[in-house]
Amino acid sequence: MASETDIETVAVDLRRRLAGQLQEDGWLRSPAWRAAVEATPRHLFVPRFYRESNTPGVTTWEPVTPETAGQEEWLRLVYTDETWMTQFDSRDIDWADPKPISNAAPTSSSTLPSLVVRMLEDLDVQDGMNILEIGTGTGYSTALMCHRLGSERVASIETDDGVARRAREALTTAGYTPRLLVGDGRAGHPDGAPYDRLIATCGFRNIPPAWLNQVQPGGVILTTLRGWMRSLGLVKLIVTGDSASGWFSEDDPSFMIARQQDAPESLGMIPAPDDGTTRKATYGPEVLSSSGPAFMAQLAAPDARSFSMAVDGGPASTFVLDSVTDSFAVLAPTDDGWQVRQGGPRRLWEAVESAVGTWEEYGSPSTAAFGVTVSRGEQVVWLGNPNGPQWPLPS
Ligand SMILES: C[S@@+](CC[C@H](N)C(=O)[O-])C[C@H]1O[C@@H](n2cnc3c(N)ncnc32)[C@H](O)[C@@H]1O
């Protein structure tokens, strides 16, 4: 086993290469953030992690530690532009005897460095600004901010005790002392307010109202929004007193959903074969899987989830179930397209078809044509401009 000094010598070189690659790829745009990447020892924050293995069929993750992979390979992997998983199903890993993991949901990770630095660049920070991070995770992104602004300017909230404890240890070892809090980031941290910038590295179904009170006018909130079917993408809001407004980015990066907002375990009642009313569908279930239409479907049916299942030995039908209002839509193939059977208080497929129709009328734009306005009373996603077509975010 090489000494800490040997590891650091190799790591310095690997960090320089990672920073060079991130700059070449256009993610790192400023010398100050490049210096932070070159200085921050990611290997202290991901001393052990899981990576997806190439097992066909079921998604499986395998442990990577200096022992399992060899020190050189472990260190090389740490400094690649990859997301490394560090927790599943909110349970800590038994690192004394780590086993491959499958049928589990990642609940903490060190995010893809290119996404981390791209978000940090998007934040437009200046020296002397106060920043609040939601989702400390391993503490790597917190460390980058501490390097850039000074530990006293950084506060970070993590919901999971064990994750927060390990992040604190790693940050301390790296020489950083930000204010670290354990709790639900939706409440922010009023004692440290006002903040100039708020950045969230887990996804939310809406913008937590407390954030508006804690970010000062002119300040920025940068977060991903997501639903139970898919991510809506990254939104950058400028706070103006009691409200905030801003645009989605061109692509739709995705973060794991805030733990308190995860979908209910039960998908809801599967409707009986004669429940609901049937009509010919304008769009089939393909809208749920092609990028632009799926974004619209998520907006139109914010509490829904979908799955496909063969009914009575026949062809597969697609079920869209909203367990919040007990509404459903079932899409079944016909000789010349699809029929939809709907029931419950929300006509789910009506809402999806109308949203996809609007998107097509507007020329099938990317997510960059959409924005969000948040005020005390409501939160809406709009298309084109704040007075354009609108879809409310779930409250
Ligand atoms: C993708 S990881 C964060 C990555 C981290 N920034 C890094 O660079 O390592 C998301 C983290 O958000 C945390 N989280 C989930 N819901 C949260 C909440 N409501 N408040 C604060 N943290 C939350 C998770 O426990 C997880 O550690």
Image (cartoon, rainbow, N blue to C red):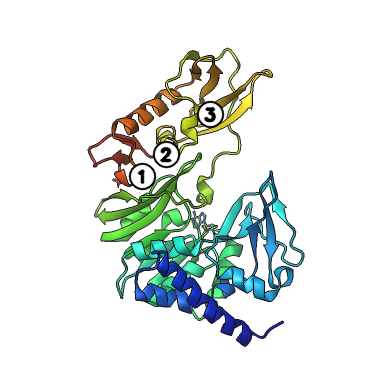
* Kind of residue indicated by mark 3: Leu
* Kind of residue indicated by mark 2: Phe
| Residue 340 position in % (x across, y down) | 49, 19
| Residue 114 position in % (x across, y down) | 46, 63
| In the image, residue 360 above or below residue 220 | above
Q: Residues within 10 Å of mark 3 (few under 14, many from 20)?
A: many
Apparent side of residue 204 relative to residue 211 in the rendered image (left or right): right
| In the image, residue 241 above or below residue 27 | above
Identify residue for label 3.
321
Taking the spot 58% from the left edge, 73% from the top edge, the residue there is 43
- Sequence-first disc among 1 and 3: 3
Examine the image and state in which quarter residue 25 appears: bottom left
Q: Residues within 10 Å of mark 1 (few under 14, many from 20)?
A: many
Kindly report the distance in space between the C-alpha atoms of the residues bearing marks 1 and 3: 25 Å
Identify residue for label 2.
295
Identify residue for label 1.
367
Q: Are marks 2 and 1 in contact (CB under 8 Å)?
A: yes
Kindly report the distance in space between the C-alpha atoms of the residues bearing marks 2 and 1: 8 Å
- Sequence-first disc among 2 and 3: 2
- Sequence-first disc among 2 and 1: 2
Q: Are marks 2 and 3 in contact (CB under 8 Å)?
A: no
* Kind of residue indicated by mark 1: Thr
